[in-house]
Image (cartoon, rainbow, N blue to C red):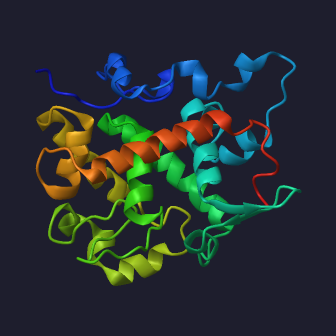
Amino acid sequence: MQRILALATVTASAVAPGMATGQAAEFGVPQATEVAQPPHAMGPSAPIAASETDFGVEGASDRRDPTKLALARALDERMTVWRSPHGRRVYVRSCRQAPGIQGGCRARIVALVQLLVDVGRERGVDPFLLAAMALRESGLNPYALGGAGERGIVQLHPRGVGSHVRFVRSESYRRGCRRRADSCQREVVDAGARLLARAMHSCDSVVEALGAYNGGECRETEYGHRVLEERAGLVRLAKAAPLETAHLVD
């Protein structure tokens, strides 16, 4: 059986070189235009919504990146526990208490979206799948601590791949990361994505690869199904969240 390299991402621009878009059929990945469209696709009179300007932190190219916009909107909704009639958001405790970060939870979401999408493309792994893993593993909290000492948003084991990741190994380094919006998570996500990509080469399905990521062997597990359910929820949020989300920087 042909090994699955990765899920196709939710937009055409997110598909890494060599990634087969036909693989999307296994989990009903929406077509390129179903989740998000760049502003020029919405007609010449459509204004650039607040979500697009506020979520584009790197420049014009990222403000026109439909995958980053879609994932940012989805995570913004997913991390929100309450919203007032006037659009003010209250985020989950771990995010709203992010110390020393200018822009607070919103800035963290933006920064993590940037690296989830960029690393996902580099490693040939669906960014929405990486984000779903991060939510299941840590609630998107860079400073979550697992029962066996796992660290980072994808919970790297200190005696596994995390043994080579500075964020996992060094408390003093982690303290220095607290004032960074991305909390130094790029190396964490990259190590997790490489591990998952290897599992996808070895296993017969994405759910088995998730089982290998979590338990070390290719098998279907409850963990894998929960991650895929989380991913499906993110796709629904990305499709449902209005482009003109009220002021994304509160």
Rendered view: 138 above or below 48? below
Picture coordinates of residue 213, whole percent (x, y):
21, 52
Looking at the figure, which quarter contains the N terminus?
A: top left
Q: Is residue 118 visible?
A: no
Q: Is residue 49 left or right of residue 229?
A: right
Rendered view: 141 above or below 7? below
Picture coordinates of residue 82, whole percent (x, y):
72, 63
Front residue of this view, candidates 26 and 181: 26
Total marks placed: 0
Residue in the picture at 37% in, 23% down: 24
Q: Residue 73 is drawn in which quadrant? A: top right
Picture coordinates of residue 250, whole percent (x, y):
79, 61
Rendered view: 150 above or below 74? below
Q: Is residue 43 left or right of residue 76?
A: right
Residue in the picture at 60% in, 74% down: 93
Q: Is residue 38 left or right of residue 4?
A: right
Front residue of this view, candidates 6 and 218: 218
Front residue of this view, candidates 80 and 171: 80
Residue in the picture at 66% in, 68% down: 104
Q: Is residue 127 left or right of residue 66?
A: left
Q: Is residue 162 visible?
A: yes
Q: Residue 242 is drawn in which quadrant? A: top right
Picture coordinates of residue 171, whole percent (x, y):
34, 83
Residue in the picture at 47% in, 39% down: 232
